[in-house]
Image (cartoon, rainbow, N blue to C red):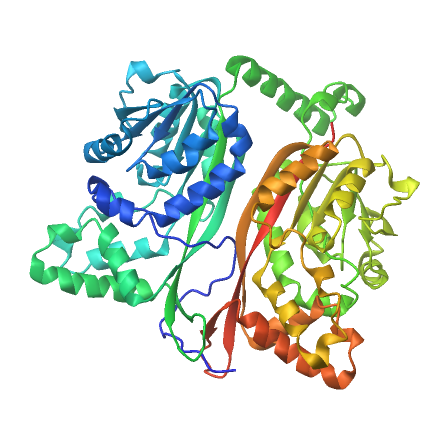
Amino acid sequence: MPRRPFIAGCIKVYREEESEISDFVISFAIMHQPASYAAVNAQQRHDAEIITDEYEEELSKISGRCLDVGTGPGDVLIDFVLPKLDPRATVVCSDISESMLKFCKESYGDNERLSFEQLDIQTLDLPKHLIGQFDIVTSFYCLHWCRDLRRAFENIFSILRPGGTSVMTFIARQPIIDVYPILAALPRYSPYVKDCERYIPFFQYNSQPRKSLKSLAENVGFEVIHCSCREKNHFFENADAMKNFLITVNPFMARMPTDLQKEYQDDLLKESLKRLIIFNRGNTEKREKSILSTFHLVVVHLKKPLFQNLISKISTIIREITRCVVRRRISCDFASLFFPYLPRYFFPSGVNSDIMHQAAAYRKANSLQRECTGRIVEEFKDELAKFSERCLDVGSGTGDVMIDIVLPKMNPNTKIFCSDISDAMLDFNKAQYGYHERILAFEKLDIQTPDLPNKFIGQFDHVTSFYCLHWCQNLSQAFKNIFDILRSGGSIFATFVAACPFYSAYPILATYPRYHSYVKDYNSIIPVLHSNNQPLQTLETLVKSIGFEVLHLSLRQTSHFYRTSDELKEFLISVNPFITQMPPDLREDYGNDLVKEASEFMEINKNNNEEDYGFLKTFTIFIVYLKKP
């Protein structure tokens, strides 16, 4: 395979989480140039579409008044938010910038559902006519510019009616922004960038933005329904495209003399590239370079309590009962009179299916599953700590994900039943963890069987599964079985692949004459929603038709970086069901061809040793949290 060029000076290796086409958000200065902003807000539009799709059901219930904070030029609101709201809903478009608001009004002022209000969401003097007047507050790519984020959240809390909600997303961390203080320290630029701190996102240097944001929102008085920190990517097609973007969103350049601007532009690009990775894209012979920028985005869904004082008092009583139980001042039997009526939550693990017969090889190559599970468990650790009783883990695989990552976060009373379709996986799991006191059994189970054994029916409080259900060709039967397995009030938390580009390599290899006879049933391992244009809506319809209540359902893009071609090959072989059916002399060729074809659907960069290259795999996963009524 041809060698790939690599730019020296790259200080960050991209690994994880969500990947999309992205532009970073505009600076305060550019917010007064609406046309320029509208030309570079592709990422804001893309992310708004994803988030509004994720919260489509919640938004559709809003028939009252909506306040959109930081509306900007208005296209995000008009194209993605407004169509999701009930047709009776009206929206107040707000922005701190008079020119932005004017641009928005000129573009969309004829829409009878819209009105316009200039508003600084951090103001210490919130207009009285806004207080308690809105059913929902939305905001996309705005709040990271707030220096007093707590005041912004307090104002949003005040703006909402009791029972009102808020769906917002904004930047947590953006590595390119780190360049601002570096250039500000240079004497030739310092007179023009003295206020660079003003343009640094609130959580830029916070190592735990999700935890901090959740705490902030709760302290203000919100009920936090969802809070996550998601990693995103953006590929600039070339250095010129990146330079143009940096110039467009930079707040300082317009202050500088013309002769200094060119020098600042070059230094800005040079310092920014040190924080990014250069890839070759598409045909390797063309050696077309693209630049990967990564950043973190927070997504938060909040609710203003309907009966705030009552809820506060109840929460205090519950905390005191909990303390008394822990300190053995009252019996657990007495406490159980109260706790059955409290909400139950959970969130755990699992892994694969029959094609995972190569247990040891899979265990060695499952870093992707471990990384993603770790992030998700961290996101939902508060709920996981409340999770107890009997849990069936579907597709436990080699068991390490559950034992190492999930179980330590669970309530100590949780008892796990590990299940898998593969005898080899179960044997490996049992050999490794059969001694564990919290694992009660190892059960062979095909979760999509039409004849579910009676011993599973109605026997579990929770079902968990990580990276397993995409192997099910009959996803409807799998979820129906899970519904039957659960007790009333039970829940399922699962993560599985929606679509992954390298699955497209399987039908290509099936056309190779020397492999054809061994891979005729390649469709059986391609996720059923891999080519679905509306996977989230399709899955939601499916689970609701079975009878589940949807507590959370999202489609997230994530990525994994394989540092060498051998590491990629090791993973692809470990999850491939065909290679063991081939003669030994054919397996090596198939493995190499698999890497070759799969890499056509991945981003590639040259490693420092100039003898190998790394691969960035981007794909989408479902996160599913359902309840059996």
Q: Is residue 627 above or below residue 514?
A: above
Taking depth in this image into account, of 37 and 193 the one nearest to the observer is 37
Report if residue 420 is visible in the image.
yes
The residue under the point 8% across, 58% down is 258
Task: Please state the horizontal and vertical placement of residue 261, each as a whole percent of the image.
Answer: 13, 59
Report if residue 329 is visible in the image.
no
Task: Please state the horizontal and vertical placement of residue 52, each as a whole percent of the image.
Answer: 48, 37
Q: Residue furthest bottom?
A: 585
Taking depth in this image into account, of 524 and 309 the one nearest to the observer is 524
Q: Is residue 49 left or right of residue 416?
A: left
Quadrant of image for the C terminus: top right
Q: Quadrant of residue 236?
A: bottom left
Task: Please state the horizontal and vertical placement of residue 451, each as a whole percent of the image.
Answer: 89, 45
Q: Is residue 175 left or right of residue 542?
A: left
Task: Please state the horizontal and vertical placement of residue 51, each as a whole percent of the image.
Answer: 48, 40
The residue under the point 76% across, 54% down is 396
Total tally of numbered discs in the picture: 0
The residue under the point 45% across, 37% down is 213
The residue under the point 62% across, 24% down is 319
Q: Quadrant of residue 414?
A: top right
Q: Is residue 210 above or below residue 470?
A: above
Q: Is residue 409 left or right of residue 110?
A: right
Q: Is residue 376 above or below residue 502?
A: above
Taking depth in this image into account, of 234 and 207 the one nearest to the observer is 234
